[in-house]
Amino acid sequence: MLKRIMLERTLLKRIMAIAVLAVVLSGCSTVKGWFGGKGKDDGKPTEPAELVDFTATATVSKLWSANAGKGEDRLGVHQGPAVADGRVYAAAVEGGVRAFDLQTGKTVWQYKSEERLAGGPGAGDGLVVVGSLDGKVIALDAATGAEKWQAKVPNEVIAAPAIGQGLVLVRSNDGRVSAFDAATGERRWFSNHDLPSLSVRGNAPVTLGPGFVFVGNDDGTLSAMALNDGRPLWNQVIGVPEGRTELERMADVDGAPVLDGTTVYATSFKKETVAIDGPSGRPLWSRDNGGPGGLGLSSGNVIVSDPAGLVWALDKTSGASLWSNTSLARRSLTAPTVHGDFAVVGDFDGYVHWLRLDNGQEAARERVGGKAVRAKPVVADGVLLVQNVEGELTAFRLQ
């Protein structure tokens, strides 16, 4: 009976997600806009903003590109790479997991799998871990790609696992967080969280802190649990699920919370971004700007992109708005990341945009294969990594 309920819930969520993607997810009300169609900004509020020429103030060079295998296409799982110890790890829906050298893009190893791998891999502590659409969890040796263990969770895994402090934490699409022993794959504990009847396609990867697990939920809340046993510590509302319809009430927190010192930052589909004291759960500030896909953090700013395609910089200490960029409206932006002195977002048409952190102005633009970028770009050792929905992985460096 439980299995039947879970299957029905998964099917319902997939059907609803298609409607959400076509109507509201990116602030673009046409399927064409979300799935990569081009549109001119001719005054129609539903069309993606047309890109305009500008004088570049940053020099970006392409280091390398590689193929990670058959990408997610229209699954909406936001596959992105992970980096650890000078290597880039990328998963494909079909094609397994590949490891690349961060500086050269040379393939180090490939793990072939018949599983349909979803989300991105997690990497750390000598492991690379990835989940599948059938709920399998596969742990690989980071040095060789050899399989170390497998485990199973009750639902698809479309978020990258987190690895640290002797555990592997896996968020599955039914709201469950499962903790496995990193060495053996034995399950240590699990924690459930009720799901709303309708939510945005996507899940927040969990974030680890010293003795803590932080996870964003589909009902617009952020939860903290004890790392050793999954015991709930606190639960805070990030986005209030208000409205007359299920669509209006969607408030998903689908981006990984960001921990900076003892402060946790999170943002939601309800365009709410908050800063919370991690140990106590006490809210520090809240701001009516944000989106479901996560945020970028610099030394002084919190950078968020909202469902309408606006990019905002908020003061890290107070949450005060510092600037906004409207030139990328309705272009289905990824969550931002920080690359040097710039905020970086990808869009539905395969473009990557560098925005100045001091004023939000466009500084550079590159294209990665002409297909949509949905996963948040990743920065490691000064290298920016972008993976598009066809599995093409591209590395850039600022000059």
Image (cartoon, helix red, strand yellow):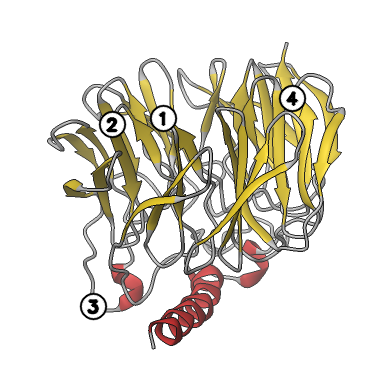
Disc 3 versus disc 4: distance between alpha carbons?
A: 45 Å
Could you say where residue 368 lies in the image, as x and y percent from the top left?
78, 41
Of the residues shown, which amino acid type is indicated by label 3? Arg
Q: Residues within 10 Å of mark 1 (few under 14, many from 20)?
A: some
| Local crowd size for mark 4, using a 10 Å CA cut-off: few (<14), some (14–19), many (≥20) | many
Mark 2 and mark 1 in contact (Cβ < 8 Å)?
yes
* Residue named by callout 3: 244
Circle nearer the N terminus (1, 3): 1
Residue type of the residue flagged with mark 2: Gly
Residue most toward the top?
Answer: 399
Q: Nearer the viewer, residue 55 or 25?
A: 25
Q: Quadrant of the C terminus?
A: top right
Q: Tag 1: residue type?
A: Gln
> Please, what secondary structure does the residue beneath circle 4 have?
strand
Which one is in front in this view, the residue at disc 1 or the one at disc 4? 1
- Relative depth, front residue between 90 and 356: 90
Tell which of 289 and 150 is nearer to you: 150
Task: First in sequence, mark 3 or 2: give its number.
Answer: 2
Please say whether residue 52 is visible from this viewpoint: no
Which residue is labeled 2 in the image? 211
Residue 183 is left or right of residue 55, and the answer is left
